[in-house]
Image (tube, rainbow, N blue to C red):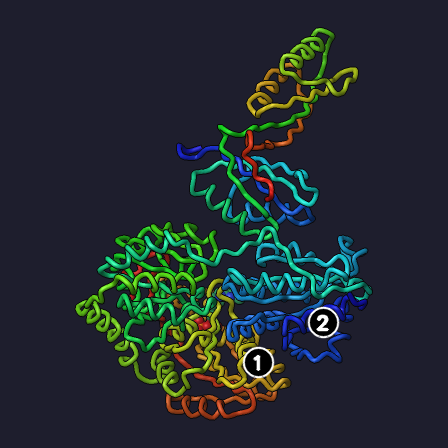
Amino acid sequence: MVKMTGAKALIESLKREKVEVIFGIPGGAILPVYDELYEASIRHILMRHEQCAAHAADGYARASGRVGVCMATSGPGATNLVTGIANAYMDSSPIVAFTGQVPKAFIGKDAFQETDIIGITTPITKCNFQITAASQIPKIVKTAFHIASTGRCGPVLIDIPRDTQTEEAEMNFDVRIDLRGYRLNHDPHPLQVKKAVDLLMNAEKPVILAGGGVIASNACSELLSVAELLLAPVATTLLGKGSIPENHPLSLGMVGMHGTIAANKIIQEADVLLAVGTRFADRTTGSVKKFCVDAKIIHIDIDTSEIGKNIRPHIPIVADAKKALKSIYANLVQILQRKERTEWMRKIKEFKDQQEGIVNSKEGLSPPRLLSELRKILPENAIITTEVGQNQMWAALYMKVYKPRTFISSGGLGTMGFGFPAALGAKTACPDQPVIDIAGDGSFIMTEQDLASSVVWGIPVTVIVLNNSVLGMVAQWQRLFYNRRYSAVNLGKVPDFVKLAEAYGAQGVKVGSVEELKEAVMKSLKSEVTTVIDVPISSEENVFPMVPPGGELDKFMVG
Amino acid sequence: MSQDEKLHIISAIVEHKPGVLHSVSNMFRRRGFNIESISVGVAEQEDLARMTITIKGDERTVEQVVKQLKKIIDVVKVSILNPAHTVTRELALIKVSTPDAQARSDIINYTEIFKGHVVDVAHESLIIEVTGDSDKINAFIELMKPFGVKEIARTGITALPRGMRSIKME
Ligand SMILES: Cc1ncc(C[n+]2csc(CCOP(=O)(O)OP(=O)(O)O)c2C)c(N)n1
């Protein structure tokens, strides 16, 4: 036991969690903590908006597999974090958010900059805590990191009244955490595994659906082993991109509303679907009633409440994806005779070629061609983040991902403005990997102010703005489903992105051809400073294939 | 209530601390599950509380409710109670007008039959306490209506499994 202030104990606790960096913005209610940070060895990156601090922590977490940390003051600081926290919650990203709070005696009195952040974040955090005595800090911080990073990962918020930051107390850092209501179930039930293996062994057309959970549990090599053993093609969700190298013959690409032709066609043909670490989101399944109608579904997920929530599986397996896949592999390998699926594989190849055809049919600055050409010059380990909208779906369709944790996108919440701050977080976590944000003009404008922090803190990333002067994805829906009534999608005047970048001390360049784009990107990768590349594209482009909302996956529009 | 919808009794042991009821009730609201009744009080261990929640719905709904409840970190244990092996009770306080002496004595008679108690006496009204299952309380209230029921307060169902079945903490 040692005596110290709550603020000091907080810093000490963070050190024990091996936190290297905090993204945040200070304010009155969290000043004692910032005062301690002044001489602490932990790096603090001052952002320009708390939403960006939360997204940066999220990007850091997804790129590194470690917990990301963000910090804000009470009231407006705390509420500005909310979008970022909700985003992390929907995508099961492990972050811990600290918020200052008014002194205990003022809580509930509508004091200056008081807000009930516990009440606000209850539905968007895995768990949250308000500290009522300084002495609780070591235990609560330890608990928060444990909860955020285990089981189904997710955000945890800790609200710290200002007086508990200055209060002195005896601190016990070796305290044990005991959570009676949080028991983790990692191991798959052997009986369920056996049932799954029986199904898989006899499957004629087995398909694997890999979600973000595969990446979160570092189960990618296990996934590949099972796929290769079964000769089962693998479709991924948006968050599952990277769970299988997308140049692998068994990779189908992304499934869903904007899924690839191969993924959407083949998954509907499955007789056994092995779904791992996915929550069967509506953007993935299309019409639930018409999803994989002929397939027996095996669903592996660490979160019991996901089993049967949207899709009722024939065989539920509540377990860590890595352990479950390992166990399935171990059982299968003993009994399975390798099957030839030549005809099916040929068909898959045909669908993939059709998709390639979409790229090659386009000339000039068509996004599919732009992005596939761009992919060719990026190293395999380049981290791609995206904003939300057409840019995101083009990136998902045409930027092949080869390694886990190198594709970072806002899936569940679909947050415009996510990609750029997430890129800053990812670059902070992986300074030796190139980081590229594929952006839309509308999205980039939402968090562009953090160009400042990228420059000041020397976090060089590349932002490629697919500049169509419209809120492209919304315009696409209006074009396809609202009779071209373009209500409120024309951005009218977007800033000159080159000047905007330069105004912040970053660099900007406008390109007019694929060659110029490649050149600009190559240059940006060598640069010490963030580069914004403005790529004017037509505002009439659509993202295809597209399954209309609620439709069947294999009934898509192609243009 | 459709055919496969029926009343389910869920018993949840939760951490006895501020904010837990909010997390639980908020989960119901957010996921669109409808609470029929909820009663909360300290459990056998002082730092735990027992929530008895009744909901109407089909098997799938109850299954999701239980899973979503278990997911809340401050929820320690959840069970679905089988009505056949469960003691359920509700307590109601009913304030009834007593227009005249006849009415007053009738009410007191009924109260005795229902094994209730008169817990407050005023010139023009009585407060009666009745406990039992919800049907019994409903029946009693029906009986009181002609006299003029002024106010009712009901606790909602609370329940325990019969015999050695126990859902307390190991
Ligand atoms: C914060 C936020 N507000 C609104 C939306 C709704 N929305 C989805 S896509 C989109 C348009 C995105 O436009 P832009 O960033 O320019 O990308 P594009 O689709 O043109 O590639 C909008 C407004 C959203 N996803 N997030």
Residue B58 placement: quadrant: top left
Q: Decide: few, some or many residues near mark 1? Use Cα within 10 Å; few <14, some 14-19, many ≥20.
A: many
For mark 2, give the secondary structure. helix
Q: Is residue A48 above or below residue B13?
A: below
Residue A536 placement: quadrant: bottom left
Percent position of residue A355, x then y:
28, 74
Measured in 3D between alpha carbons, the distance from the residue under mark 1 to the one under mark 2, in whole angstroms, is 22 Å
Q: Are marks 1 and 2 in contact (CB under 8 Å)?
A: no
Judging by the rendered image, the residue that carries numbered circle 2 is A12
> At 72% from the left edge and 12% from the top edge, which residue is drawn?
B99
Q: Nearer the viewer, mark 1 or mark 2?
A: 2
Q: Chain of mark 1?
A: A
Q: Nearer the viewer, residue A529 or A383?
A: A383
Seen as rendered, the residue at the extreme front is: A334
Percent position of residue B42, x then y:
68, 39
> At 26% from the left edge and 68% from the top edge, which residue is drawn?
A231
Q: Is residue A216 left or right of residue A311?
A: right
Q: Amino acid at mark 2?
A: Glu
Percent position of residue A138, x then y:
71, 64
Q: Nearer the viewer, residue B132 or A529?
A: B132
Q: Amino acid at mark 1?
A: Thr
Judging by the rendered image, the residue that carries numbered circle 1 is A428
Q: Is residue A7 left or right of residue A256?
A: right
